[in-house]
Image (cartoon, grey):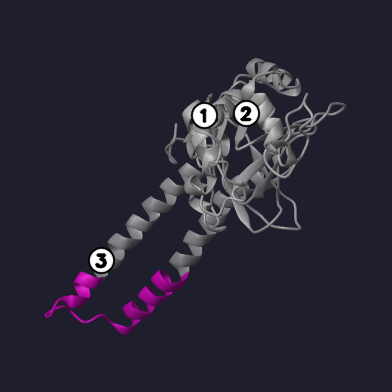
């Protein structure tokens, strides 16, 4: 479900309805203006009286725009307010931080440790979820077109967006504010699942990674990957880059640019700037091909 007009959430459905109303209104206005232009271009047209001219200016230039804009406000403001208002008490809250050029996603549950992942949201169907938005560098804009409207993420400020998914499926999210070299490669996946499946997934994400003792795990430790990344259950506990505890279970890597396969993992780890220009991640292309593949196999195994 990647179409912007394929609404899978209440907010997106309201925006789609508003778009239909605005498109119909614009078509009517265009038709009226075109007819007036055709009438004005006629060489042998009857002259309008001064009273008719004043009526046209007052009616078409003042009353009609005022009525149309007032109607759009009446229709649009309630839909906007529902997405900007805080979610009901006790609702799931997900913290999303925009960073060049990826998304840090944190689930915080009362009385439990925070669960962090990257470039992927998992949401329960039929529930209102409050997305708490921040940025650590420049202005980003969080947008899942098929679920809700977009909201800017401004350094030093906290903004919020309430999403209410109504249909299970996988949806594409993007950054809607130009933020640098890899802005177009700053995507993410939002997967809407049934509440029971979401609870099971969240419990699985809370568990530490399965400890592996293989070539890839030793390379991860010896190559300094733990200086930037965390893998819960191991000595790696840094937070500069994405948390990799369950990276193997994610649908995509590199901010939605690549599929989560061993080959694509090896490609990104070896030459990240070739996939995302300006990426701050150092390249590991100097590793032998077998070692690079072993490292990718270890990452894919972090389920």
Which residue is situated farthest in the bottom direction here? 50
Q: CA distance from mark 2 to mark 1?
A: 9 Å
Residue at x-position 30% and y-position 63%: 32
Q: Of callouts 3 and 2, which one flags the residue occurring earlier in the amino acid sequence?
A: 3
The segment highlighted magenta reads 37-62
Residue 8 in sight: no
Residue 241 in sight: yes
Q: Secondary structure at mark 2?
A: helix
Q: Of callouts 2 and 1, which one flags the residue occurring earlier in the amino acid sequence?
A: 2
> Based on the displayed image, in which of its 4 quarters is residue 128 positioned?
top right
Residue 112 drawn above or below residue 79: above
Instruction: Report if the CB atoms under discs 2 and 1 are less than 8 Å apart.
Output: yes
Q: Nearer the viewer, mark 3 or mark 1?
A: 1
Q: Which residue is mark 2?
A: 247
Left or right placement of residue 46 versus residue 277 in this view: left
Q: Which residue is mark 3?
A: 34
Q: Position of residue 110 (x, y in %)?
A: 85, 29
Residue at x-position 67% and y-position 25%: 217
The one nearer the camera, 66 or 132, is: 132
- Quarter of the picture containing the C terminus is top right
Q: Is residue 46 magenta?
A: yes
């Amino acid at each position: 479900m990647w179409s912007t007009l394929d609404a899978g959430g209440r907010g997106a459905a309201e925006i789609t309805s508003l778009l239909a109303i605005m498109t119909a209104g614009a078509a009517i206005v265009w038709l009226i203006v075109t007819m007036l232009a055709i009438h004005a271009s006629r060489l042998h047209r009857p002259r309008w009286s001064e009273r008719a001219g004043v009526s046209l200016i007052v009616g078409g230039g003042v009353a009609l725009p005022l009525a149309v804009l007032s109607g759009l406000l009446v229709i649009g403001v309630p839909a906007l307010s529902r997405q900007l208002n805080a979610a009901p008490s006790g609702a799931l809250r997900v913290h999303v931080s925009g960073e060049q050029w990826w998304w840090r996603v944190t689930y915080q549950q009362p009385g439990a440790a925070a669960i962090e992942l990257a470039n992927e949201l998992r949401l329960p169907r039929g529930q209102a979820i409050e997305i708490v938005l921040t940025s650590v560098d420049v202005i980003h804009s969080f947008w899942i077109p098929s679920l809700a409207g977009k909201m800017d993420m401004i350094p030093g400020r906290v903004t919020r967006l309430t999403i209410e998914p109504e249909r299970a499926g996988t949806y594409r999210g993007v950054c809607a504010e130009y933020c640098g070299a890899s802005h177009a490669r700053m995507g993410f996946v939002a997967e809407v699942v049934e509440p029971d499946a979401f609870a099971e997934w969240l419990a699985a994400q809370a568990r530490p990674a399965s400890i592996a003792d293989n070539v890839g795990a030793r390379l991860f430790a010896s190559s300094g990957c733990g200086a930037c990344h965390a893998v819960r259950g191991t000595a790696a506990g840094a937070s500069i880059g994405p948390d990799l505890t369950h990276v193997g279970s994610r649908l995509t890597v590199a901010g939605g640019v690549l599929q989560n396969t061993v080959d694509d993992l090896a490609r990104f780890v070896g030459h990240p700037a070739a996939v995302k220009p300006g990426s701050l991640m150092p390249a590991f292309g100097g590793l032998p091909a077998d070692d690079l593949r072993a490292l990718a196999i270890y990452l894919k195994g972090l389920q």
